[in-house]
Amino acid sequence: MVKKPITLGHIKFDKKGDALSLFKKMLNKYSPGDSVSAEDAETLSLALANHPDATQKIGSGISSFSVGKADFGTQCFWVNRTDGSTERFSYISCLK
């Protein structure tokens, strides 16, 4: 399999697996209901900008990020918008 480099803003990964690993570790260091640290939020902002539905996911603008549950009880990231609404998103979709 050929390595596929991933670039998210100023962050460069040699291969997609490295990026997936970073976001998986990031997600798993939080519990549902936790707010994401400012440092991790910067990285998530870069990733979310790469999401195929970025405009819809970002909506009115990003206020913060948090961790919550998805449909099947799995943990996922949520974007908290400036208008008070929230939207879950898959970091995996951000890396395609």
Image (cartoon, rainbow, N blue to C red):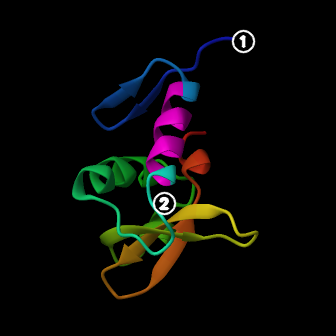
Q: Quadrant of the C terminus?
A: top right
Q: Residue at x 48, y 65 (%)?
A: 31
Secondary structure of residue under mark 2: helix
Q: Which mark is residue 1?
A: 1
Spatial distance from mark 1 to mark 2, Cα to Cα?
28 Å
Residue 90: give x, y in percent of width and height.
59, 56
- Snapshot quadrant of residue 10: top left
Q: Which mark is residue 11?
A: none
Quick one: 61 or 79, which is closer to the camera? 79
Q: Position of residue 12 (x, y in %)?
A: 37, 26
- On whether residue 83 falls in the magenta region, the answer is no
Residue neighbourhood size for the residue with mark 1, other residues' Cα within 10 Å, grouped as few (<14), some (14–19), many (≥20): few
Between residue 26 and residue 18, name the one nearer to us. 26
Q: Quadrant of the N terminus?
A: top right
Magenta region, residue range: 18-27
Residue sitting nearer the eye, 75 or 93: 75
Q: Residue 92 or 57: which is nearer the viewer?
A: 92
Q: Main secondary structure of the magenta part?
A: helix
Please provide percent x and percent y for residue 38. 23, 58
Query: Would you place residue 9 above or below residue 30 in this image?
Result: above
Q: Residue furthest right?
A: 72
Name the amino acid, label 1: Met
Task: Name which residue lies at 47% across and 80% down.
Answer: 86
- Is residue 82 shown left or right of residue 87? left
Amino acid found under the numbered disc labelled 2: Ala
- Magenta-drawn stretch contains 23: yes
**Residue bearing the label numbered 2:** 54
| Residue name at image x 46 percent, y 17 percent | 14
Is 58 left, or right, of 11 in this rendering? right
Quick one: which residue is furthest to the top in this view? 2
Residue depicted at x 52% and y 52%: 51
Determine whether label 1 and label 2 are within 8 Å by CB. no
